[in-house]
Every structure is written in C-alpha cells, then in structure tokens.
Image (cartoon, rainbow, N blue to C red):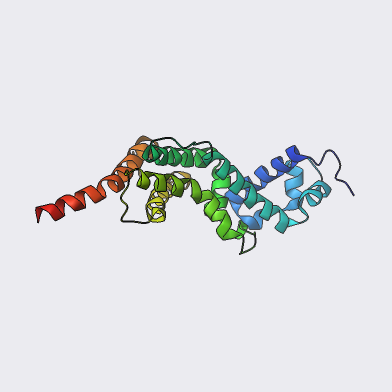
Amino acid sequence: MAKPKTHDEALRLRLLHRAAATVFDRGTAALSLRQLAADVKTSTTAVYSLFGNKAGLLSSLYQEAVHLFVERLATVHPTDDPAGDVIRIGLAYREYAVANPHLYAILFSDRSVQCSSESDRPREVVETYRPLIDAVSRGQRAGQFSSESAPEVIALSVWGMAHGLVSLVLSGNEPPELAVADCYERALRALVAGWREGEERASGVADAM
C-alpha cells in the first residue's frame, strides 16, 4: 500500500532530526517511537510506515548523518592548491559538526546507532574519508606533501586532529579560557605545514651529516 502523502520526505527528515537529538541527549535506550511521534506531532503509524521499526529508524538515522556529512565535504571543490584544499576540508568538517552536533555524534561516537550491515561500514567510512585522501594524493603529485608516507596516513593525521578538537567542543571539555574556535584553523595550517616540510627538513639533516 502506498504511503499517505503526509508521510513525505519532510516528515521523514523531521523525525530523523528529532530522533538524533534524543539519542544525542539521552542515548538510544531513551528513543521511543511513540514519544518521537508525539514530539513531531504525527502518528506512530507514520513512523512505522517510514522506517518499519526502531532498528530501521536507527539505520536511517546513521545513513542520514553519513549523507549530510559527505554532502558537506563535497562542497569543497578541488583547486590547483591541494594543500589549501586539505585546510578547507578541515574547516568544512568543523562547520558540519558545530551545525549538526547530534548527527556528528551519531556518525562518530555512538556505535549503537550504526546499524548498517558490517559489509557496508567500510564503504561508508571511505566515503567520508575520500575527499581528504584525494586532496592529499593530489598534493603529493604536486610536490606539496611528503611522498614518504601514504596519503591515507597524512589524511588520518588531519582527520584525527580535527576530530579531537571538535570533540572537545561538543563534549563541553574545552580548557578554561581557551576556545577551539580561536585556534582551529591555525592548528590545521601548522599540521599541514609539517607534512609539507617534513621531507625537506629530513633532506637538510641528511645533507648536513
């Protein structure tokens, strides 16, 4: 039977974002389909029609977080300055997290929500990671990054630093009187500069010996 017109994409997204906020605040155990329907002012019939059950809702929630994250990073178009692209991707990463803290937490923190099949997870992770790896690979071909390390290693270091700083903000654990927003871009630039200059420094040390 076809879904009623009121069970449309707009309602699906409202339910997903409300569910994400609930999971972010109180965990998956607190997510009730009946309460979710009441919060969004719809029926439990609509929730079941759109997602099937709670497991289907959680799987859709994770997929939506992945989709929006990939979509946001894709707005950083490749340029003839790959190292600069890496920094711009890092900035887009933070912007997504700050704008969508509940979805970001579901994407990277709450493993219980990641209900997609085990075989799909590596593909999904690569999709979120691919723009950064591609930018580093282009930078290596252009001579902007050290070629001594795999592009995945350099990309992982950038991603790890971005995730660490963002997580301090979202968890409320920024050090007193220090704001991540004030140093985030400088930290990105310093890390990128280190990977750009690492090979040159190593070569200089070897020449001096």
Indicate left or right for 134 with 5 as reference. left
Image x and y of residue 177, in percent: 33, 38
Residue 191 sits above or below residue 75 on the image: below
Q: Quadrant of residue 122?
A: bottom right
Residue occupying image coordinates x 39% and y 53% = 151
Query: In the rendered image, is residue 122 in sight?
Result: yes
Indicate left or right for 185 with 45 as reference. left
Query: What is the quadrant of the C terminus in the image?
Result: bottom left
Task: Determine the residue located farthest toward the right in the rendered image.
Answer: 1
Q: Nearer the viewer, residue 68 or 24?
A: 68
Q: Quadrant of residue 12?
A: top right
Q: Nearer the viewer, residue 93 or 104?
A: 93
Indicate left or right for 83 with 53 as reference. left
Image x and y of residue 142, in percent: 35, 43
Residue occupying image coordinates x 61% and y 45% = 67
Q: Nearer the viewer, residue 47 or 192?
A: 192
Q: Quadrant of residue 186?
A: top left
Task: Determine the residue located farthest toward the left in the rendered image.
Answer: 209
Residue 99 sits above or below residue 35 on the image: above
Image x and y of residue 73, in percent: 52, 41
Total numbered circles: 0
Q: Nearer the viewer, residue 148 or 127?
A: 148
Query: In the rendered image, is residue 165 in sight?
Result: no
Image x and y of residue 24, in percent: 58, 49
